[in-house]
Image (tube, rainbow, N blue to C red):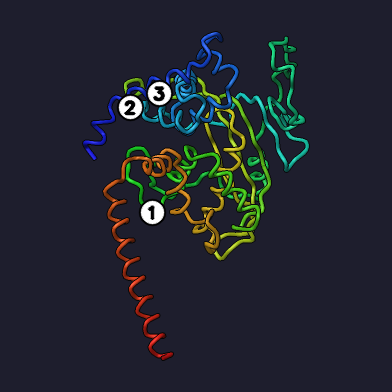
Amino acid sequence: MYVAVKGGEAAIANAHRLLADRRRGDRALPAITIDQVVEQLGLAVDRVMAEASLYDRALAALAVRQARGDMIEAIFILRAYRTTLPRFGYCEPVDTAKMKVERRVSATYKDLPGGQLLGPTFDYTHRLLDPSLIGDEPVDEPVLKEPGEHVTRVSDILDGEGLIEGDGQMPEGHVAGDLTREPMEFPMARDLRLQALARGDEGFLLALAYSTQRGYGRTHPFVGEVRIGEVEVELELPELGFAVSLGVIRVTECQMVNQFKGSSRQPPQFTRGYGLVFGQSERKAMSMSLVDRALRTDEFDEDIVAPAQDQEFVISHADNVQATGFVEHLKLPHYVDFQAELDLVRRMRREHDAAQAGAKDGMKEAAE
């Protein structure tokens, strides 16, 4: 195999040049800029940031451009870069109750403190190709609502009546884990599961979430709230004795409300599924919240009857970078392995043919 790899150096170099040529495309057209990717392909940038676990719009845009629009390749590139960055601390938990809300919708209450804010969404578009986008026609300025009434969370309304479980309660003395620095072990605590889901593949989580709605899991969900907006990130500095603001990031949060009939330990109440991801990514946050609730079988004495409820299955297969590496490594040379398999099949065929010939001879002698 070493000879094969060494002999292919020139071919690999040529493949790199061809890739660069295809990435650039027609030289008669202007090259796409990083700013254009950030501003006009923002949802692709947001997905790359979320699944690479690195909030940097310019770097995510660079990865998208480098990968020629291949989302998983871009995620791979950005996550590899992330491993080179120093870790100098952990921020304080972001307070989404103080979010500067850009979009907020609820399927549980029509009238809410702060109102329903539709925001930038495809929900009400007709999903028809728009020929006007072929050119660069002027776009009308948006009409924005003036800041006003406090946007109360739906979960807080239910909690006020004692109708929903507590918000993110962990066992006493529990220290939040770090999936990027600790080996994966099962069973996995909810905080680590949420970390894995937040950087998991959107398509995989969407399929699992869909499966729970089709009966493969114990969920009967209502979208308590989906909200998109900016939250402040703070870091506590020991030398100062208080937290300082590092800036703001845009996130998408989903609280999924599910029924629960109660158990010997808990009264009937609503339970939560939770999703929080970088950028604007409602589909991912909603899928994450559905899968999060499905994985909480131990907490509610539920039987594991579906794939979405099996944490080892879900978490072990949610990471698209790992999945890509495992699948695409099949393209690498496996000449020795295949020759061994080929020799084995040939030997088995010879034995099979000999056995068949012997059986025919036996039948012929019996007939005579």
Can you say whether 179 is above or below 34 in the image?
Answer: below
- Which quadrant: the C terminus? bottom left
Q: Residues within 10 Å of mark 1 (few under 14, many from 20)?
A: few
Q: Residue at x 47, y 37 (%)?
A: 199
Q: Residue furthest left?
A: 3
CA gap between label 2 and label 3 equals 53 Å
Residue for point 58% across, 35% down: 253
Q: Is residue 14 left or right of residue 167?
A: left
In the rendered structure, which disc, 2 or 3, sits on the residue that comes first in sequence? Answer: 2
Q: Position of residue 358 (x, y in %)?
A: 34, 79
The residue that label 2 is drawn on is 12
* Rendering coords of residue 69 (x, y %): 52, 26
Q: Mark 1: which secondary structure?
A: loop
Name the amino acid, label 3. Answer: Phe
Quadrant of residue 148 in the image? top right
The answer, for residue 245, to whether it is visible in the render is no
Q: Amino acid at mark 2?
A: Ile
Say the numbered circle drawn on residue 186: 1
**Tag nearer the camera, 2 or 1:** 2
Q: Nearer the viewer, residue 3 or 61?
A: 3
Residue where numbered disc 3 is placed: 242
- Mark 2 / mark 1, whichever is N-terminal: 2
Q: Quadrant of residue 154?
A: top right
Could you give the CA–CA distance between mark 2 and mark 1, rounded to whole angstroms?
A: 40 Å
Amino acid at pointer 1: Phe
Callout 2 touching callout 1 (CB < 8 Å): no
